[in-house]
Image (tube, rainbow, N blue to C red):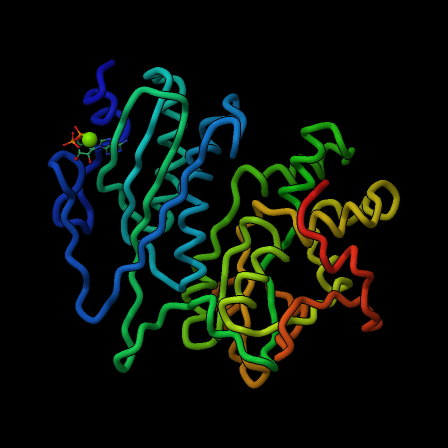
Amino acid sequence: MGEFDLIAQFFQRPAGQAVLGIGDDCALLQPAPGRQLAVSSDMLVAGRHFLPEVDPLTLGHKALAVNLSDLAACGARPVAFTLALALPEASAQWLEPFARGLFALADAHQCELIGGDTTRGPLNICITVLGDVPVVQGRSAALLRSGAKAGDDLYVSGTLGDARLALHCLHGREILPSAQLAAARVRLETPTPRVALGLALRGVASAAIDISDGLLGDLRHILRASGVGARLDTARALSLLGHGRNTADAALPQATRLACVLAGGDDYELAFTAPASARTAVEAAASRSDTAITRIGRIEAEPGLRLVDGQGQALPDSYASFDHFA
Ligand code: ADP
Ligand code: MG
């Protein structure tokens, strides 16, 4: 199978919204009037972001999901994407399920593949996604990292920590009952980009980010960009752990649970802030997008991140400075 057969067989589909899709030197898009383009790229490298033997079906999903998650964080509506692919060999056995996983998610978000590049090389997947956001009264409606204000509430969507917990188990470092491991593994391999929530939070949230590297690390990006600090209730954060929760008391040390939730990464949930006066609007956005949210803290004027327990007592510095797994 040659390069062009490969593209035609697995990736070329009739153009949808695009003026011109795959097949020429450029694709052509016509931006809707009064809207801005939101653009983001994410690369997945075999051996670094995934094991080369991972199921290509879930890999196709995840490669696009991590990109859609960036659009979600900005409150952008997915429009189209490009796919740059380096492959060690042209294997239909690998390409067919990869394309199936990719297009299933793309179709669910009406996000069209409009081009890319294909080359031989170590397995590497780079997607660039394009979305759009309206301009309202001359101002972009995009959600940014820089809008958090002292007094705002701090929220997280969905669950946190399961992806890292699954990775730990797959590396033989923790043991979960098989049903729970299977559920946690779904979170690791087929994350759900919170696109609907991001759209619903436009005009409601003051700042947002998607959690790819871990809650604390990504939250710090909001704090730095906004010039503020935060107080985070670790007891509430712990309640975000999904699939390790039931067995947690018996089998999983508290430190492991906290580490997974605070610094796990790969969850692709949204962390966002909103004024306390907008609590009803935040709840409405969550239910409109059918996405669970949890309020886990508050933005403060004093820079830095302060972790407290359920009684409001400051946690020792070792937790406060916790960043990554040893
Ligand atoms: P060029 O050499 O002019 O850059 P290519 O020959 O690499 O173009 O690609 C031919 C067409 O196929 C282009 O429209 C390109 O966008 C598209 N394409 C190449 N690889 C992929 C891919 N992996 N997925 C989708 N479209 C692709
Ligand atoms: Mg090319």
Screen quadrant of the N terminus: top left
Question: x, y percentage for residue 32?
Answer: 19, 64
Using residue 230 as the reference point, say whether residue 69 is left or right of it: left
Split into 4 quadrants, where in the image is the C terminus? top right
> Could you say where residue 293 lies in the image, as x and y percent from the top left?
60, 65
- The answer to which quarter of the image holds residue 14 is top left
Front residue of 277 and 232:
232
State the residue lying farthest toward the right: 250
State which image quarter holds ligand 2: top left
Give me the residue at 27% from left, 49% from top.
Answer: 80
Going 55% across and 72% down the picture, which residue do you hit?
Answer: 273
> Up-down: is 153 above or below 80?
below
Give the vertical position of 278 relative to 166 (above or below): below
User: In the displayed structure, would residue 182 be above or below residue 53?
Assistant: below
215 with respect to 65 (left or right): right
Q: Position of residue 173 (x, y in %)?
A: 76, 32
Q: Residue furthest bottom?
A: 277
Residue closer to the observer: 1 or 288: 1
- Residue at left 22%, top 20%? 3
- Describe residue 118's horizontal placement relative to residue 154 as left or right: left
Q: So how many labels did they put on this image?
A: 0
In the image, residue 45 above or below residue 38: above
Q: Which residue is drawn at 52% across and 27% down?
A: 47
Nearest the viewer among 94 and 52 is 52
